[in-house]
Amino acid sequence: MKKFFTTMLFFILGVLAFGEKFEKPVLLTSVGQSADVQMVSVLLKKAGVEATLDKNITGDKLGADKTVVIAIGGSSKGLGAAGIKVEDELARTEQLLKAAKDKGIKIVGLHVGGEQRRGELSDKFVNATVGECDYLIVVEDGNKDQLFTKVAEEKKIPLVLVPKISGAVEPLKEIF
């Protein structure tokens, strides 16, 4: 019960204190090529947010989008299926984030894979992405080491922790 109230407190503080609103059109992409991008797509739909999905977009292809939503989580299977090396995905990530910032496009990062989507591979993408986000939504058990909390506090990034994946719908509704 305490965990629930802590989560709700983070959610309420995130909405009230930061009051961040993000504009449409929205582009959804993956950083790390995990299947989590499909789950984030479903969450956006449930929140009533239409988004264009492009798992491999590069910064030079960013168009009229006002917000980029990034599903953060590395997958060796996903990278292999896409024929992408870790180094190439990290380079794409860096270039995409820089281009979005240069164009004034807001970045919303979601880590919905929880503890299972953490580890050496995923953390490369987490570390490359989190500090560049304008807003973060994270499933609590993916933050057991407090990495997301530490970066969010240091960079003053609004962070909403949710107890399970479906909990990300409300914060998405609130920010769009």
Image: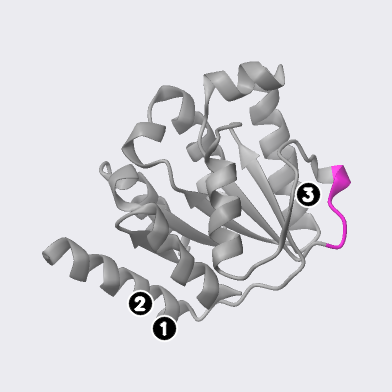
In the rendered image, residue 8, in percent from the top left (x then y), is placed at: 28, 72
**How would you classify the magenta stretch by its main secondary structure?**
loop
Q: Is residue 171 left or right of residue 31?
A: left
| Numbered label attached to residue 99 | 3
What percent of the width, then of the height, locates residue 103? Answer: 81, 59
Q: Which residues are magenta?
A: 60-64
Amino acid under disc 2: Leu
Mark 3, Cα crowd under 10 Å, few <14 / some 14-19 / many 20+, is some
Residue 13: mark in rendering: 2
Q: Earlier in the sequence, mark 3 or mark 1?
A: 1
Quarter the C terminus occupies = bottom right
| Residue beneath the point at 71% across and 39% down | 55
- Find residue 159 and report its image quarter: bottom left
* Residue closest to the far left: 1
Q: Height in image: 170 above or below 124? A: below
Say which residue label 1 marks: 16
Please determine whether, in this image, residue 39 is positioned above or below residue 8: above
Q: Secondary structure at mark 2?
A: helix
**Mark 2 and 1 residues: CB-CB less than 8 Å, in contact?**
yes
Disc 1 crowd rating (10 Å Cα; few below 14, some 14-19, many 20+) is: few
